[in-house]
Image (spheres, rainbow, N blue to C red):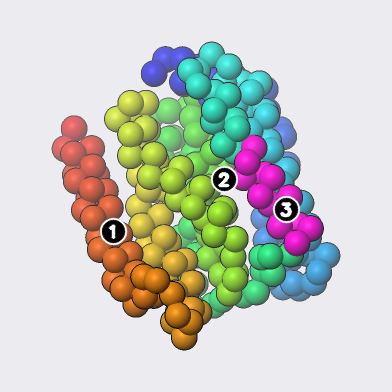
Amino acid sequence: MEIFWNTITQYNEGTWWAQLIITVVGVLLTIQLYRKPTLWAKRSMKIYMVFLNGWISIVYYMMYCGARGHNHILATFWGVIALIWLWDLFTDYTPFERNPKYKALVGVLYAMPFLYPLLSWARGMEFPMMTTTVMPCSVAVFTIGLLLAFSRRVNLLVILFLCHWALIAFSKVYIYKIPEDLLLASATVPAIYLFFKNYFDQNLHKETKPRARFMNWFLIFICVIVGILLSMTLLQEMGR
């Protein structure tokens, strides 16, 4: 655990100015995508996502987390997501078409990257040994929120990768003492369902095996199970 927090301290000390710029650029691009979703705005956001995930892969994991075990595997994981966004940039698979049905949840997801450092501060931690807006879980929750806001058609590969990452947050709560990661894990449960519900709704008229309706109910069951596990984790953490 000491190695984990030491690497975060070194990362924040060495990149705080870059993290500030990256955060501001992300906010501005998101606003532009809402106000004027031109082709340029959509491509700019995808370029930003390529850069952002590449940053986590190369700068965060390769440069600053070398002391951790398996950092190359985690760097590869985020590098693959960056490549998926690069592929999406050229194929335009994700058109960033607005879906206003989930405004409340999207708003919560957008706020979470900023809640991470606030929660760290609230539990007695100080900069640079604290979570910030440009770290893996913050990037994951921002991406989930962005795709949910524009979920007419999304790249499910990105969703699957990020949801897998979010569920790993359960273990990090105990191993590295990061209760902040409960934010990501809890938000992912409804997000998983909504993403795949959209997909099934769009394909209910098609002949699929197993049937889309069956898969919809199966997904609800899985999300309930994950939600129960999350609740148990949260109650145990609060009881400490």
Asked if residue 231 shows in the view, the reply is yes
Q: What residue would you read off at disc 2?
A: 139
Q: Residue at x 59, y 71 (%)?
A: 153
Q: Residue at x 69, y 45 (%)?
A: 83
Q: What residue would you read off at disc 1?
A: 222
The answer to whether residue 47 is left or right of residue 15 is right
What amino acid type should be assigned to the residue bearing mark 2? Val
- Quarter holding the N terminus is top left
**At which x and y percent is residue 210?**
36, 70
Q: Quadrant of residue 66?
A: top right
Q: Secondary structure at mark 3?
A: helix
Q: What residue would you read off at disc 3?
A: 87
Q: Secondary structure at mark 2?
A: helix
Q: Residues within 10 Å of mark 1 (few under 14, many from 20)?
A: some
Q: Residue at x 54, y 14 (%)?
A: 67
Q: Which residues are magenta?
A: 79-91
Question: Label 3 near label 1: C-beta < 8 Å?
Answer: no
- Closer to the chain start, of discs 1 and 2, is 2
Q: Residues within 10 Å of mark 3 (few under 14, many from 20)?
A: some
What amino acid type should be assigned to the residue bearing mark 1? Ile
Nearest the camera: 156 or 235? Answer: 156
The answer to whether residue 108 is left or right of residue 23 is left
Of circles 1 and 2, which is in front?
1
Nearest the camera: 33 or 211? Answer: 211
Secondary structure, magenta segment, majority class: helix
